[in-house]
Image (cartoon, rainbow, N blue to C red):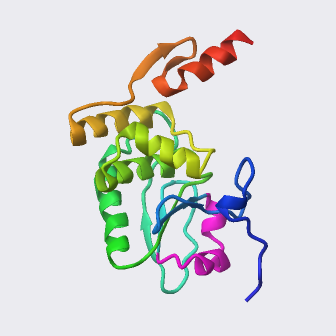
């Protein structure tokens, strides 16, 4: 087996390297499509299930790994809500069998983090704000698109009858309130 230089999340500075997985829980990782197609990395992290949340990336199938396909485009009009429960359930099921899940999309920025946030709300009883704060600390490049945010906000309300994040009007359109300061700063430059 070839050894590849890996930066572990705790060693990373700034954005993840092309071969880096971001560890979210003891059994859940997020990455981009390039990483998800690297058998050495999947083996190194003992990944047993790969969830591909994209339409443009084909799975690279490896023996002893189960694959789940979530055909969603990264556009604000794409409907991801119907995948929140089944994907969260699948991640939880893999964890209960002592397996590990790699959740990926093309870049590991929008679709896979949106599914991760839903999982953390459902199975770790985190609010959407807590789930986002946690996931962003583990993978700083996450940024679900605004359509996914709206669906996550609806999902949080379904789970908890309360919202910790909401959409607000801004100079660049509707955005999650957690991005208000960033947009205001950008607009003042």
Residue 36 visible in rendering: yes
- Please provide the residue range marked out in magenta: 32-48
Q: Position of residue 67 (x, y in %)?
A: 45, 72
User: Is residue 71 part of the magenta span, yes or no?
Assistant: no
Residue in the foreground of this view, choosing between 88 and 140: 140
Check the picture and name the quadrant holding the N terminus: bottom right
Specify the quadrant of the image occupied by residue 182.
top right
| Vertical order, 36 against 120 (above or below) | below
Residue 77 visible in rendering: no
| Vertical order, 37 against 174 (above or below) | below
For the point 30% across and 49% down, the residue is 125
User: Is residue 45 part of the magenta span, yes or no?
Assistant: yes
Q: Position of residue 93 (x, y in %)?
A: 31, 70
Specify the quadrant of the image occupied by residue 119.
bottom left
Q: Is residue 139 left or right of residue 28?
A: right
Q: Position of residue 19 (x, y in %)?
A: 71, 64
């Amino acid at each position: 087996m070839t050894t590849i230089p890996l930066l572990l999340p705790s060693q990373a500075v700034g954005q993840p390297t092309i071969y880096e997985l971001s560890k979210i829980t003891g059994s859940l990782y997020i990455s981009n499509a390039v990483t998800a197609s690297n058998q050495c990395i999947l083996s190194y992290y003992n990944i047993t299930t790969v969830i591909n949340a994209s339409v443009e990336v084909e799975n690279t199938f490896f023996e002893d790994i189960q694959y789940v396909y979530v055909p969603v485009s990264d556009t604000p009009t794409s409907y991801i809500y119907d995948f929140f429960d089944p994907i969260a359930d699948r991640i939880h099921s893999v964890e209960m069998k002592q397996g590990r899940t790699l959740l990926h999309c093309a870049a590991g920025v929008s679709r896979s983090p949106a599914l991760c946030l839903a999982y953390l709300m459902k199975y770790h009883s985190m609010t959407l704000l807590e789930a986002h704060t946690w996931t962003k600390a583990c993978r700083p490049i996450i940024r679900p698109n605004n359509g996914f945010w709206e669906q996550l906000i609806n999902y949080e309300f379904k789970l908890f009858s309360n919202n910790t994040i909401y959409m607000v009007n801004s100079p660049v359109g509707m955005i999650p309130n957690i991005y208000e300061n960033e947009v205001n700063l950008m607009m003042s430059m």
